[in-house]
Every structure is written in structure tokens, then in C-alpha cells.
Amino acid sequence: MTDRGPLVIIGTGLAGYTLAREFRALDSERPLLLVSHDDGAFYSKPMLSNALSQGRDPEALVTATAEQMAERLQARILTHRSVRHIDRAAHRLLLEDGEQIEYATLVLTVGARPIRIPLEGNAADSVYSINSLEDYRRFRTGLDGHHDVLIMGAGLIGCEFANDLAATGHAVHVADPAPRPLGRLAPPPNALRLLERLQDLGVDWHLEDHVARLSHAGSGAGLRALLASGAELETDIVLSAVGLRPDTRLAEDAGLECNRGIVVDHLLRTTDPDIYALGDCIELDGQVLPFVQPIMVGAKALARTLAGEPTEVRYPPMPVVVKTPACPTVVAPPPPDTEGNWQVEEDEAGIVSRFVDVDGHLRGFALSGDRVRLRQALTAKLQSD
């Protein structure tokens, strides 16, 4: 890539800032602009689900302001600004306030949006979702002085928040239509071990069930949740952790190909050769990977491409760490549609589940408890097999 015109990144989350940092390490001169819809503060998003038990308030999670990041990156950062439209023909962004910004190359790091579950009841709009530091600030403010929390969703984020809240003395209920936590991520033995350990911590599970109605309690204090089973729960706070959906709105409006996410090739290039995408918003080879490591790997490859050395992203085995101290868990799911079976070794100290394909090769694993120490060895085995 020889174009020395402005490189513009939409988004200042982990993907946007990591890409900017990797790019600046290779090219210190090309004009770089980032557009942020929030204050542009840099923070570790994965820390949100463990901050309470670590005694950290939202502001303590910020490691750099937008001004500090602009100085470090030799970049211009626009904060509290939203992009309304991408004019691909003119290579121009139209912002909500009417300002227009020209780009030579554009990167979309717009992330994902929380899935909203429609609920009946007069308190349906009282549900919290956490997908940003600002969301977390609101949640912590709402949580202050309250004890009971109902979490909708028993996936990775739901389990992490359940652990964090229960460990700090809150009464936690978790409702999910699935028969066990981490249903899409972990094999049954590991999922059930997590269920048991969180239950020991005080988490009350409502599996194969979901919230149907949310109403204000008659006294005006607290909420009443009606589950599909007919069970009723009294709670102070409801947190939705039912999942994220790639934010494809800008890309779709611009006419870029989108499916589950913004469709990219192995150069992380969209169907417009001057527009790339990275992070939770993308779909590559039919997969959406809303985790940290794919962002880090992708940012390095894309930075080289943007600096003039076209580099395809090749993901190594990327185990997912579930931050649940009550039951440490690591999962490396097998590739989709891989034929094989789980082979499980289990004792009180932990669980090792290996997914072995029909040819006898290790294609995935899940570790619980003390067995998470085998992560490095099994990851190396995945690479060698």
C-alpha cells in the first residue's frame, strides 16, 4: 500500500487503539485520525467483569485519556463524535454534527452491540447491559446500596459477572434457556463443574428458563421478574448478558457486504479495497470471534498491511479464558463441524476434556480447576497436531 493520505479508524476500543499502536510502530509519519463516540479513554474491557471483587471503581480502570493516547500515537482523536454515513465514492465520512472527514484508507473497529431481549412489563427498560466503560459506570451507580442481582444469560460474560457479584456478597440469580452454563463454549463436564462451584459461592441458577416479564414491585422499591416457568423472583438489579451482535449498521448503510458481521477477507479487507475492519464487528470465513486474542493477532497483521506489506491474518490456537476464580476455566473449542468426540478426565481438583477427531488428532480442549495449568502444553499440542 503506497497511499500516504489519511488513515482513519472509527472506534477507540481495544481493536482501534491496538491497531493504531501497531501501525505507529511501523509508520510514524502517515496522518492518523481516530473517531470515538465516547470520551476515548483507554481501558481494559475484559477487566469490567472482575472489577468489583478487585475493589476497583470504574475510573480506576482507565489507563489513559484520549489526550494522552493522541500524544502517544501522534494522532488526532475526535471524542463524543459519531459517524452518520460513509461516502465511499468521495472517500469521505459524514459525522452526525455535519462535519466531513476525508480518508484515503478507512478501518472500521466499531465492535458489537448487546442483544436486546424483548420483555413484557412496566420495568422492561430497567435492564442494564454492559458493553463499555460508560455502561459499567451506570451499572455500578445503580448497584450502589443494592444487594440482589438477576443476570439474564449464563454464557461467558454472565458467569464472570455472577462470580464477581457473588464474591462481593451480592445475592445472584442467573436465568438462561440452556440446560447448563457456557452451553455454546464448553463441553458438559466443564460447564457443570463451573455451575457447581458458582453454586457453592451462592449463585442461584434458573436454567432451561428465562425472564418473560419485568415489573416494578408494588412498594415502588425493587423489581419483580416473572420467568417463563411461572417462577417469580424479587430483585434490585437486572443485568442482561445474553450476548453481542456485530455492529454492521455503518457498513450496511455504505453498501459493504455483511452477514453475521462485516465480511472481510484474510487481509481484513471489506468488499471495498480501501476499507478494512477489525475486532468484534467482523466475520471471517463465516466465523465471528468476539474475544481479545483475535483482535491482537489481527491488529499486528493489519498494521503491516496498512504500512505497505500486505499480510494475511492467520489465527493460531486461541484458548478462551473464563475469568471465574471460583472455578478457573479455559476452553479451546474445536473448529466448527469437526467430527470427533470429547475424552474427559475428571477428579475433585479439576477436569481435562480433550476433543479428538476421527483421525486421533487433538482439535480442542477444555480445562477446569487446577488443570488450567495444562493450557500451554495443550495449546502447543494443538499447533503440532
Image (spheres, rainbow, N blue to C red):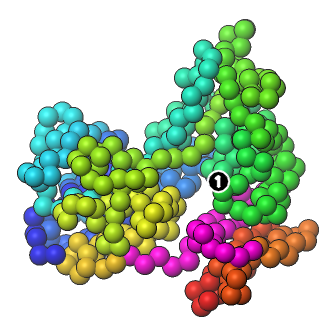
Is residue 306 rendered magenta in the image? Answer: no
Residue drawn at (56%, 46%) of the image? 243
Give coordinates of residue 355: x percent, y percent. Answer: 71, 76
The answer to which image quadrant residue 176 occupies is: top right
**Residue at image point 72% right, 70% down:** 366
| Outermost residue, top side | 219
Report if residue 221 is visible in the image.
no
**Residue 339 belongs to magenta span:** yes
Magenta range: 313-341
Q: Which residue matches tag 1? A: 156
Left or right? Give the position of 298 relative to 213. Answer: left
For badge 1, the amino acid type reads Leu
Q: Return the residue found at the far bottom.
A: 384
Front-lying residue, 266 or 105 = 266
Residue at (87, 49) in percent of width and height: 200
Residue at image location 39% in from the left, 70% down from the top: 298
The x, y position of residue 336, in whole percent, is: 58, 68
